[in-house]
Amino acid sequence: MPAPTPFIRTIRAATLAGLLCGAAPAAMAQAISTASTANTGISQEQALALSARLDALEQRNEELERQITDLKAASSANTQIVRDQVNALPTVSVNNARPTITSADGNFKFAVRSLAQFDAAHYSVSPRTAANDLGSGANFRRARLGVEGTAWKDWNFGLWGEFGGSGGESAILNQAYLEYAGWKPFGLDEPIRFRIGAWATPAGLEDATSNTEELFLERAAIAELVRGFATGDGRTGVGATARGPGWYASAVLTGKVVGVPATPELDQQSGYALRIAFNPIHGADYDVHIGANLQSILNPADTTAGPISTRAVRLQERPELRVSGIRLVDTGAIASDGLTAYGLEGAASWHNLYASGEWYKIDVNREAVPPAVSAFDPSFSGWYVQGAWAITGEHHGWTNANGGFVGIKPLKPFDRSKGTWGAWEIAARYSVLDLDDHAGVSGRAAPAGGIRGGEQKITTVGLNWYPNSVVRFLLDYQWADVDRLNAAGASIGENVHVVSFRSQYAF
């Protein structure tokens, strides 16, 4: 191939320079014209024609660039539309096995909740009689399924069914409530929550800990007894709670427990419950709790039709286990127009150690016939202390959600492939429930108006295993010592030894 002539080389150089440097077509044409005059092989007209073709190519290139820019803009707009549509869709999440649907703006939420606790126990009773024959066996202590949610940001709701039981109970409504949480007066960090329906407002410290996170299979006897006066599962009512950093307060007016009562009720029970709790000392791995609570049955349920009301209260409790329905301490029905329970709370946690306790006094307003029996109003009491050591290092933290402590979550969930074993915890408790008042002495009949409900003392030790945040297993040993006299003064007390086991999942 012959080498390019000097003129061709000049045209190529001018064209390339113009394209690379953005030279104007006129400048390129001038360069080409100059080149043509220097070389008589191509006329000026031919050079100008070539320049015109180059101008056309440049215009075509600019048009293609505009089309590419328009395509990019259209593509970006379509991508944004798709992103906006995706962002507007509800999100579905699973947190600790709990399915939750949340709207894009967070104003609507719907979550499915479930809890199952399967208990087994072996009782050893001495002496064993027909009245205190605690039957060994197993049952579903709790088997609950429900939903909770939020609507329009400020309205919360819950609906739970209970399909388990603790003896002879049948499936019932556990809770159904509507709550408004859109008002934050007085500079509060969190809104005051107004609730109506049926639910369980915490009656005390032990009650403030979820039944899925308790140290033992059951609460201490006194705590379980008191929560049944004017609060407890499925108790109808209307009330409010307020909370902030380091404090919690609640006030509720209550009625009956949902379900069909063992004795027909004409006028339902009415009562109230007040509670306040503080976390005055708090750190990353330590908490201190102090609190107080007050409950009252204003009017016991009327169980007789007609102009004469029959109202009574009855204090009775199982030995901190629900596999058997037998109550070992029981005041029997006390004709009464109400009662009041006062409670003090204290607890602390430090690193992987936890300790708590409560004391209660119960005053009954007696309504008795003959009048001589009403010379005094009976009083009862109870208390407990308990503690736990998380062997694997987990910490019981304080929360203002209910004004109490939460259970532990394993730092390293159980995984055989990784050699991790979840969380392990050792716990111990001593509790006293005294349902005697003016009980008299052994061998003699009870004094007039005296109540021989009995005194129950229980020592419990437990070993808890938490494979993960959903599943846990509890193994408890209990020794219950019951001191009680019958109406004639004979001892009907007993010693009870119990080994019990619970398997649980909750989300």
Image (tube, rainbow, N blue to C red):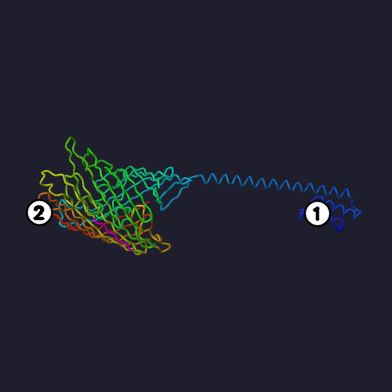
In the rendered view, does 288 fall on the left or right side of 484? Answer: right
Camera-side residue: 69 or 295? Answer: 295
SS at badge 1: helix
* 485 in magenta: no
Camera-side residue: 189 or 287? Answer: 189
* 357 in magenta: yes
Q: Quadrant of the N terminus?
A: bottom right
Residue 146 place in picture, x, y as percent: 36, 45
Q: Which residues are magenta?
A: 353-359
Tell me the CA gap for discs 1 and 2. Answer: 124 Å
Residue 154 place in picture, x, y as percent: 41, 44
Specify the label residue 489 is tagged with: 2
Residue carrying label 1: 15
Please, which residue is most extreme toward the left here?
Answer: 444
Count the marks: 2
Residue 362 place in picture, x, y as percent: 21, 51
> From what the image shows, is residue 254 above or below residue 118?
above
SS at badge 2: loop
Q: Main secondary structure of the magenta part?
A: strand
Q: Residues within 10 Å of mark 2 (few under 14, many from 20)?
A: some
> From what the image shows, is residue 141 above or below residue 307?
below
Residue at position x 40%, y 60% in the image: 413
Residue 69 place in picture, x, y as percent: 67, 47
Q: Say what amino acid the circle numbered 1 marks.
A: Thr
In the rendered view, does 91 fall on the left or right side of 396? Answer: right
